Amino acid sequence: MLDRRGALGSLIVGLLASVPARRAHAEGAPLSDPTEVLPLWPAAPPGGEVVTAVEAILERGDPAGLRDRAMTHIRNPRLVVFRPKVPNGAAVMLIPGGGYERVVLDKEGYETARWLSERGYTCFVLFYRLPGDGWRAGPDTPLQDAQRAIRLVRSRASAMGFKPDRVAIMGFSAGGHVAASLTTRSAAAVYERVDAVDDLPARPDLSALIYPVISLDPAIMHAGSRRQLLGQNPTPEQIALYSPDRQVAAGLPPVFLLHAADDPAVPVQNSLTMFTALKARAVPTE
Protein backbone atom coordinates (compact mmCIF):
# COMPACT_ATOMS: atom_id res chain seq x y z
CA MET A 1 0.00 0.00 0.00
CA LEU A 2 1.07 3.57 -0.64
CA ASP A 3 1.34 5.71 2.49
CA ARG A 4 0.41 9.38 2.41
CA ARG A 5 3.98 10.57 1.93
CA GLY A 6 4.31 8.26 -1.05
CA ALA A 7 0.96 9.36 -2.40
CA LEU A 8 1.91 13.00 -1.90
CA GLY A 9 5.20 12.47 -3.69
CA SER A 10 3.47 10.71 -6.56
CA LEU A 11 0.90 13.50 -6.78
CA ILE A 12 3.58 16.20 -6.83
CA VAL A 13 5.58 14.40 -9.50
CA GLY A 14 2.42 13.84 -11.53
CA LEU A 15 1.39 17.47 -11.29
CA LEU A 16 4.86 18.81 -11.96
CA ALA A 17 5.59 16.65 -15.00
CA SER A 18 4.48 18.66 -18.01
CA VAL A 19 2.75 17.07 -20.99
CA PRO A 20 5.96 17.28 -23.09
CA ALA A 21 7.87 15.71 -20.20
CA ARG A 22 5.44 12.79 -19.96
CA ARG A 23 5.64 12.29 -23.73
CA ALA A 24 9.45 12.35 -23.64
CA HIS A 25 9.52 9.76 -20.86
CA ALA A 26 7.02 7.58 -22.68
CA GLU A 27 9.14 7.65 -25.82
CA GLY A 28 12.29 6.85 -23.84
CA ALA A 29 13.91 10.23 -24.46
CA PRO A 30 14.77 11.93 -21.16
CA LEU A 31 14.65 15.70 -21.10
CA SER A 32 18.03 17.36 -21.42
CA ASP A 33 19.47 19.04 -18.36
CA PRO A 34 19.64 22.84 -18.26
CA THR A 35 22.97 24.33 -19.23
CA GLU A 36 22.85 27.73 -17.51
CA VAL A 37 24.71 27.44 -14.20
CA LEU A 38 25.67 30.19 -11.72
CA PRO A 39 28.55 29.37 -9.36
CA LEU A 40 27.76 30.76 -5.91
CA TRP A 41 31.24 31.93 -5.04
CA PRO A 42 33.68 33.85 -7.29
CA ALA A 43 36.54 31.69 -6.01
CA ALA A 44 36.64 28.59 -3.80
CA PRO A 45 33.79 28.32 -1.25
CA PRO A 46 34.77 29.40 2.26
CA GLY A 47 36.27 26.95 4.73
CA GLY A 48 37.24 24.10 2.42
CA GLU A 49 40.90 23.78 3.34
CA VAL A 50 40.62 20.18 4.54
CA VAL A 51 37.75 18.97 2.35
CA THR A 52 38.76 15.99 0.23
CA ALA A 53 35.37 14.58 -0.79
CA VAL A 54 34.81 14.03 -4.52
CA GLU A 55 31.57 15.29 -6.06
CA ALA A 56 29.47 12.61 -7.79
CA ILE A 57 25.99 11.99 -9.21
CA LEU A 58 24.08 8.87 -8.17
CA GLU A 59 21.64 7.29 -10.63
CA ARG A 60 19.01 5.87 -8.28
CA GLY A 61 16.36 4.67 -10.71
CA ASP A 62 12.62 4.93 -10.26
CA PRO A 63 9.92 2.22 -10.49
CA ALA A 64 7.69 4.60 -12.45
CA GLY A 65 10.37 5.12 -15.08
CA LEU A 66 11.10 8.73 -14.16
CA ARG A 67 14.70 9.83 -13.80
CA ASP A 68 15.87 10.00 -10.18
CA ARG A 69 19.37 11.30 -9.48
CA ALA A 70 21.15 12.78 -6.50
CA MET A 71 24.41 14.68 -6.09
CA THR A 72 26.83 13.84 -3.26
CA HIS A 73 29.88 15.57 -1.75
CA ILE A 74 29.19 18.89 -3.43
CA ARG A 75 32.42 20.85 -3.85
CA ASN A 76 31.20 23.63 -6.15
CA PRO A 77 27.85 24.92 -4.87
CA ARG A 78 25.77 26.46 -7.63
CA LEU A 79 22.41 27.53 -8.97
CA VAL A 80 20.97 25.83 -12.06
CA VAL A 81 18.74 28.23 -13.96
CA PHE A 82 15.36 27.64 -15.63
CA ARG A 83 14.24 30.69 -17.60
CA PRO A 84 10.57 31.09 -18.55
CA LYS A 85 9.57 32.09 -22.06
CA VAL A 86 7.52 34.96 -20.62
CA PRO A 87 8.71 36.06 -17.14
CA ASN A 88 5.91 36.92 -14.73
CA GLY A 89 8.09 39.10 -12.52
CA ALA A 90 8.74 36.55 -9.76
CA ALA A 91 11.52 34.07 -9.00
CA VAL A 92 11.64 30.83 -7.01
CA MET A 93 14.78 29.29 -5.51
CA LEU A 94 14.27 25.55 -5.08
CA ILE A 95 16.19 23.72 -2.34
CA PRO A 96 15.93 19.92 -2.77
CA GLY A 97 16.32 17.46 0.07
CA GLY A 98 18.47 14.41 0.65
CA GLY A 99 18.94 14.04 4.39
CA TYR A 100 22.04 16.28 4.30
CA GLU A 101 23.87 13.32 2.71
CA ARG A 102 22.99 14.19 -0.88
CA VAL A 103 20.96 16.73 -2.89
CA VAL A 104 18.19 15.42 -5.15
CA LEU A 105 18.36 16.60 -8.76
CA ASP A 106 15.10 15.61 -10.40
CA LYS A 107 11.97 15.16 -8.31
CA GLU A 108 12.44 18.12 -5.96
CA GLY A 109 14.65 20.10 -8.30
CA TYR A 110 14.46 19.99 -12.08
CA GLU A 111 10.90 18.61 -12.34
CA THR A 112 9.52 21.35 -10.09
CA ALA A 113 11.57 24.04 -11.79
CA ARG A 114 10.32 23.03 -15.24
CA TRP A 115 6.70 23.17 -14.09
CA LEU A 116 7.09 26.58 -12.46
CA SER A 117 9.10 28.07 -15.33
CA GLU A 118 6.37 27.02 -17.78
CA ARG A 119 4.08 29.27 -15.73
CA GLY A 120 6.35 32.30 -15.88
CA TYR A 121 8.54 31.90 -12.81
CA THR A 122 12.28 32.29 -13.16
CA CYS A 123 13.63 29.29 -11.25
CA PHE A 124 16.94 28.47 -9.64
CA VAL A 125 17.76 25.01 -8.25
CA LEU A 126 20.30 25.23 -5.42
CA PHE A 127 23.01 22.62 -5.01
CA TYR A 128 24.41 23.34 -1.55
CA ARG A 129 27.40 21.95 0.30
CA LEU A 130 26.81 19.24 2.88
CA PRO A 131 27.83 19.64 6.54
CA GLY A 132 29.39 16.19 6.92
CA ASP A 133 32.11 16.77 4.31
CA GLY A 134 34.48 18.66 6.61
CA TRP A 135 33.74 22.31 5.79
CA ARG A 136 34.96 24.66 8.50
CA ALA A 137 31.51 26.17 9.09
CA GLY A 138 30.09 22.74 9.96
CA PRO A 139 26.31 22.97 10.40
CA ASP A 140 26.26 26.54 9.05
CA THR A 141 27.70 25.41 5.70
CA PRO A 142 24.33 24.92 3.93
CA LEU A 143 23.11 28.26 5.32
CA GLN A 144 26.21 29.98 3.93
CA ASP A 145 25.27 28.72 0.48
CA ALA A 146 21.58 29.54 0.88
CA GLN A 147 22.30 33.14 1.96
CA ARG A 148 24.80 33.64 -0.84
CA ALA A 149 22.43 32.03 -3.35
CA ILE A 150 19.40 34.23 -2.67
CA ARG A 151 21.60 37.31 -2.77
CA LEU A 152 22.99 36.14 -6.11
CA VAL A 153 19.44 35.58 -7.39
CA ARG A 154 18.50 39.14 -6.42
CA SER A 155 21.60 40.49 -8.15
CA ARG A 156 20.26 39.04 -11.44
CA ALA A 157 16.69 40.35 -11.07
CA SER A 158 16.83 43.23 -13.54
CA ALA A 159 18.71 41.26 -16.19
CA MET A 160 16.41 38.24 -15.92
CA GLY A 161 13.04 39.97 -15.78
CA PHE A 162 11.83 39.59 -12.19
CA LYS A 163 11.57 41.90 -9.21
CA PRO A 164 14.13 41.67 -6.39
CA ASP A 165 11.30 41.86 -3.84
CA ARG A 166 9.45 38.89 -5.39
CA VAL A 167 11.89 36.08 -4.62
CA ALA A 168 10.40 32.98 -3.01
CA ILE A 169 12.14 29.86 -1.71
CA MET A 170 10.79 26.31 -1.70
CA GLY A 171 12.58 23.62 0.32
CA PHE A 172 11.87 19.89 0.56
CA SER A 173 12.70 17.60 3.52
CA ALA A 174 16.29 18.42 4.59
CA GLY A 175 16.14 21.17 1.96
CA GLY A 176 13.14 22.37 3.94
CA HIS A 177 15.46 22.69 6.92
CA VAL A 178 17.81 24.78 4.79
CA ALA A 179 14.86 26.93 3.69
CA ALA A 180 13.51 27.28 7.24
CA SER A 181 16.99 28.19 8.48
CA LEU A 182 17.29 30.83 5.76
CA THR A 183 13.85 32.15 6.70
CA THR A 184 14.65 32.47 10.41
CA ARG A 185 18.38 33.27 10.22
CA SER A 186 18.68 35.32 7.05
CA ALA A 187 20.51 38.07 8.93
CA ALA A 188 22.95 35.76 10.73
CA ALA A 189 26.58 36.54 9.86
CA VAL A 190 27.69 33.05 8.83
CA TYR A 191 30.34 34.13 6.31
CA GLU A 192 32.49 37.17 5.57
CA ARG A 193 31.53 39.57 2.80
CA VAL A 194 32.97 38.56 -0.57
CA ASP A 195 31.72 41.24 -2.98
CA ALA A 196 28.82 43.60 -3.72
CA VAL A 197 26.39 40.66 -4.01
CA ASP A 198 26.67 40.26 -0.25
CA ASP A 199 25.29 43.75 0.30
CA LEU A 200 21.88 42.52 -0.89
CA PRO A 201 19.32 41.11 1.60
CA ALA A 202 19.17 37.36 2.19
CA ARG A 203 15.58 37.45 3.48
CA PRO A 204 13.15 35.55 1.22
CA ASP A 205 9.87 37.22 0.35
CA LEU A 206 7.94 33.95 0.73
CA SER A 207 8.92 30.53 2.07
CA ALA A 208 7.33 27.21 1.11
CA LEU A 209 8.40 24.33 3.36
CA ILE A 210 7.48 20.94 1.89
CA TYR A 211 7.58 18.02 4.40
CA PRO A 212 10.44 19.91 6.06
CA VAL A 213 12.93 18.79 8.67
CA ILE A 214 12.48 21.42 11.40
CA SER A 215 13.07 20.32 14.98
CA LEU A 216 16.24 18.56 16.12
CA ASP A 217 14.50 17.49 19.33
CA PRO A 218 14.96 13.70 19.65
CA ALA A 219 11.21 13.25 20.11
CA ILE A 220 10.34 14.33 16.56
CA MET A 221 13.65 14.67 14.72
CA HIS A 222 14.76 13.19 11.44
CA ALA A 223 17.69 11.26 12.86
CA GLY A 224 19.83 11.19 9.73
CA SER A 225 19.63 14.94 9.16
CA ARG A 226 20.48 15.72 12.77
CA ARG A 227 23.44 13.33 12.72
CA GLN A 228 24.84 14.90 9.56
CA LEU A 229 24.40 18.41 10.95
CA LEU A 230 25.47 18.04 14.57
CA GLY A 231 26.97 14.60 15.08
CA GLN A 232 25.87 11.97 17.58
CA ASN A 233 25.81 14.06 20.77
CA PRO A 234 24.82 17.68 20.15
CA THR A 235 24.50 20.10 23.05
CA PRO A 236 21.15 21.62 24.05
CA GLU A 237 22.45 24.95 22.74
CA GLN A 238 23.19 23.43 19.32
CA ILE A 239 19.77 21.77 19.17
CA ALA A 240 18.10 25.12 19.92
CA LEU A 241 20.16 27.11 17.39
CA TYR A 242 19.63 24.65 14.54
CA SER A 243 15.91 24.04 15.16
CA PRO A 244 14.22 26.79 13.11
CA ASP A 245 11.02 26.62 15.16
CA ARG A 246 13.06 27.92 18.10
CA GLN A 247 14.50 30.77 16.04
CA VAL A 248 11.19 32.27 14.90
CA ALA A 249 10.88 36.03 15.45
CA ALA A 250 8.29 38.61 14.51
CA GLY A 251 8.55 40.08 11.03
CA LEU A 252 9.44 36.95 9.10
CA PRO A 253 8.07 36.52 5.55
CA PRO A 254 4.90 34.47 5.00
CA VAL A 255 5.40 30.72 5.30
CA PHE A 256 3.44 27.91 3.60
CA LEU A 257 3.79 24.37 4.95
CA LEU A 258 2.83 21.08 3.28
CA HIS A 259 3.14 17.75 5.09
CA ALA A 260 1.42 14.35 5.12
CA ALA A 261 -0.06 13.47 8.50
CA ASP A 262 1.45 9.97 8.52
CA ASP A 263 4.82 10.77 6.91
CA PRO A 264 7.09 7.87 7.98
CA ALA A 265 10.37 9.69 7.25
CA VAL A 266 9.94 13.21 8.66
CA PRO A 267 7.25 13.28 11.37
CA VAL A 268 4.45 15.75 10.69
CA GLN A 269 5.12 17.24 14.15
CA ASN A 270 7.98 19.11 12.47
CA SER A 271 5.54 21.20 10.41
CA LEU A 272 3.04 21.48 13.25
CA THR A 273 5.72 22.75 15.61
CA MET A 274 6.87 25.32 13.05
CA PHE A 275 3.28 26.38 12.36
CA THR A 276 2.65 26.91 16.06
CA ALA A 277 5.83 28.93 16.49
CA LEU A 278 5.00 31.13 13.50
CA LYS A 279 1.44 31.77 14.70
CA ALA A 280 2.73 32.70 18.16
CA ARG A 281 4.82 35.45 16.55
CA ALA A 282 2.00 36.58 14.24
CA VAL A 283 3.89 35.52 11.10
CA PRO A 284 1.45 34.87 8.23
CA THR A 285 1.37 31.10 7.73
CA GLU A 286 -0.80 28.37 6.24
Image (cartoon, rainbow, N blue to C red):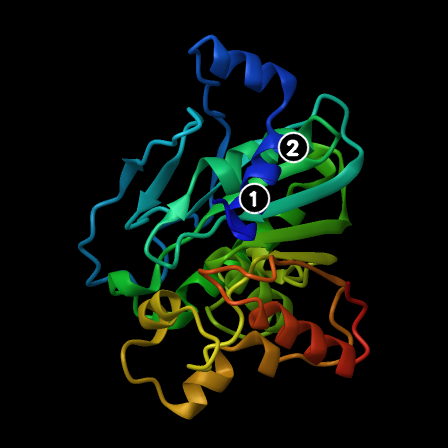
Q: Residue furthest bottom?
A: 236
When the figure is inspected, residue 210 is found, relative to residue 8, above or below; the finding is below
Residue drawn at 75 percent across, 65 percent down: 253
Residue drawn at 59 percent across, 27 percent down: 17
Position of residue 219 in the picture relative to residue 129 (left or right) = right
Q: Nearer the viewer, residue 281 or 79?
A: 281
Mark 1 residue element = helix
If the image is split into quadrants, where does the C terminus sit?
bottom right
Mark 1 crowd level (few <14, some 14–19, many ≥20, 10 Å Cα): few
Position of residue 148 in the picture relative to residue 66 (left or right) = right
Identify residue for label 1. Answer: 7
Q: Nearer the viewer, residue 261 or 183?
A: 261
Is the residue under label 1 in contact with that under label 2 (CB below 8 Å)? no
The answer to whether residue 256 shows anywhere in this view is: yes
Residue drawn at 38 percent across, 72 percent down: 226
Number of on-image labels: 2
Where is residue 209, by image quadrant? bottom right
The residue type indicated by label 1 comes to Ala
Q: Earlier in the sequence, mark 2 or mark 1?
A: 1
Residue 282 is situated, as x and y percent measured from the top left of the image, at 82, 78
Instruction: Calculate the distance from the C-alpha at mark 2 to the C-alpha at mark 1.
Output: 12 Å
Residue 121 is situated, as x and y percent measured from the top left of the image, at 72, 35
Camera-near label (2 vs 1) is 1
Mark 2 residue element = helix
Mark 2 crowd level (few <14, some 14–19, many ≥20, 10 Å Cα): few
The residue type indicated by label 2 comes to Leu
Identify residue for label 2. Answer: 15
Residue drawn at 50 percent across, 85 percent down: 240
Position of residue 218 in the picture relative to residue 263 (left or right) = left
Residue 124 is situated, as x and y percent measured from the top left of the image, at 58, 40
